[in-house]
Every structure is written in C-alpha cells, then in structure tokens.
Image (spheres, rainbow, N blue to C red):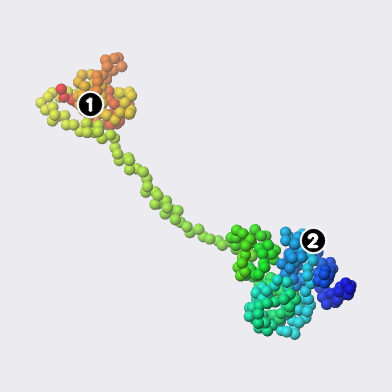
Amino acid sequence: MIKLLIVAFSFLDPQPVRDSVGIETVNGKVFVIHKVDEKETLYGISKRYGSSVDVVLKYNPTADGGLEVGQILKVPYTSRLKAQSSASTTGGIIHVVADKETLFSISKAYNVSVDDIKQWNNLSTNSLSTGQELTIKRRNTAVSTNTAAPAVSTSAIKSKTGVHTVEAKETMFSISKQYGITLQQLKSWNNLQTNELSIGQTLIVAEPEKSTTTISQQPTPAAQTTSVPVVKQEPEPVKAPRPPQKESTITITESVKGSDEISESGLAELIEGTDGNRKYLALHRTAPIGTILKVKNEMNNREVFVRVMGKLPETSLTDKLVIRVSKSAYDRLGAIDSRFRVQITYYK
C-alpha cells in the first residue's frame, strides 16, 4: 500500500522528490523528507513545498532554535503541480490552503484583498479548511508555469517594502527566519522589548538606511551665552574695609585748629602679625596713643590716615624708622618694599 502511495506521489508531483531525500507516509499523511542545505531558511523550505513556516515547525519542533546544514525535516505535502497546471486555464493560480492559513494571510501573500478572494471563489464567510483550493487571479501579471507563485510573489513584495504585516499565528521567531534575520535585529529595528505581536502589526524586516542627519543643533553656543553672563564678579566692587576708610576721612585741620602741626619724614615698615587686621594702625615714637597720623608714600604719593596704637620700640632695628604701619595701611599705601620712605603729618 505504501509503495502505491509513493508511486502515485511521484507521478502527481515529481518535484518534491528532486528537492528532497524522499517521502514518507505517517498515519495516512504524506510528508516530504528534506535535508537542509547551506543558507536555506525555514521560509524558503516551507514555500518550496507549498507549506508555511508554522506548519513546518509543528512537525519539526527542534527547528525552532534554528537550522543546521544536513538537518532532516518532515514537510507536509500539498499538490503544487495542480496549482501550477491550472494557472493557464483560470487566468491566475490555484492556492491550496495549508494548515492555519487564513483569508487575510493569503490575501497578503498575493497582494490582493480578502473581498477579491471571496468573490473569485464564491465565498460567503471567511472560514477555510486545510487542503481547500482557492482561485487567485493576478492582475497585470504574467504567470509562469515554472514558478511557485506564493514563494516568489510574497518574497518579492516584502523585500521591496522592507515591511512585514503580522498575520494570524505568526511569531517573532517565524518572521525573523522568514526574512533570514536574527531575532535581536527584528526587535532592535522595531524598538520591541518583548516577543508579543498582534495581527495587522507592521514590522521593519530590513535594516533601516542610516540617514545622514546634519547636526544643525547649535543651541550649545546659545546655552553658553546664557551662562557666560553669570560671572560672579559682583563681590569685587566691595573694596577694602570701609570702617577704616571712615577713620581715614577725618579732617584733622578742622578738629585741631590752632594747634601746632608736626611733619616728619623717614622710613616706614610693616607691623608683623597684622595680616588679618583690617584697621589702619601704626606704631610711632612720640605721638600719643590714639593720635591720628596722615602718612604719605613718597614713591607714589598715596596717602592713608592711621591711628597710633602704641610706641615704636627703641632698638637698633628701629633707629632709622619713623613709623610702623599695619598690613591694611601698608596695602593702602601701595608699598612694595619692606621699608619705604614716607612723610607724616599730625597735630599735637
């Protein structure tokens, strides 16, 4: 009985035998035994034998993880010769419905509408059965009897657009294998985080062209111009301590009118240890403590008023000095040397 089936199979459709290792009948269902060749995909194999990727995976679950050269697959047989020979008489082709195929998936495969298929086949509903024959009329298309119509037309259409519309029962894996791409590429090109799909969803199945975007974003300079004015230079106008300046604005001639004016000149020196003191202070030989002295730097004519805070000690180091001033007064006078010549004026 099996031999008769093999003979009948070979007579009706010799092409599967040439494409495959052989045929096998299991529980009355005829399978093509196919040996995977280099660079073959599940999509190409399924279309070669008039089947679908999901049907091939159903009978070959190990192929879900990818194909290997030399791997043996069992592909359910459908009569392609009948579809091909009927093409010339019907003005189109005959499609044999495979397992889990729908009117929607078939219409997308042939780039026609569901209503067209229903009209050509006098269908009132969308229900289909496995093995059912459907007439597909091709508009402005010359159909060759040597062409497996579903495989050629579908791949040609989808490769041009680079976009795939998800059909019923399709998975991320089956779509990636259909186009010979990786699952990761499919998810990356479509910004997908999971493997969930919905019928009618469109997917990019070809690597998007890298657009040359001209970087016209010049807000950076603008951002810099807005931040540049925020230069913290406001504290600088706060000049040297103002309280001492009030002391320096004392008009001695008015407060001691009629008194004797004393002027002297000589060397001045800095009082060590007054760096943190902002007051204008001095040590003098003869002026009483609290006396206000006007000190003038003879090198640059800068002046400052200082208050005597103590007597200048009588030592060999100070015998040539007339005054010592605090750090604030020293800076105010614009002194640059450790000792510098000054002129002092005060009143008894």
| Residue 190, quarter of the rendered image | bottom right
329 w.r.t. 183: above or below: above
Dot 2 or dot 1: first in sequence order is 2
Instruction: Please state, as top left, top right, bottom left or bottom right, where the C terminus lies in the image.
Output: top left
- In percent of width and height, residue 72 lies at 80, 63
What residue is rendered at 13% in x and 23% in y? 260
**Left or right position of 326 against 174:** left
**Left or right position of 185 against 274:** right
Q: Which residue is mark 1?
A: 307
- In percent of width and height, residue 15 lies at 81, 73
Q: CA distance from mark 2 to mark 1?
A: 106 Å
4 w.r.t. 40: above or below: below
Front residue of 246 and 177? 177
What residue is rendered at 20% in x and 26% in y? 292
Instruction: Please state, as top left, top right, bottom left or bottom right, where the N terminus lies in the image.
Output: bottom right
From this viewpoint, which residue is outermost toward the front?
Answer: 27
Q: Which residue is mark 2?
A: 71
| Residue 244, quarter of the rendered image | top left
Residue type for callout 2: Gln
- In percent of width and height, residue 234 lies at 33, 43
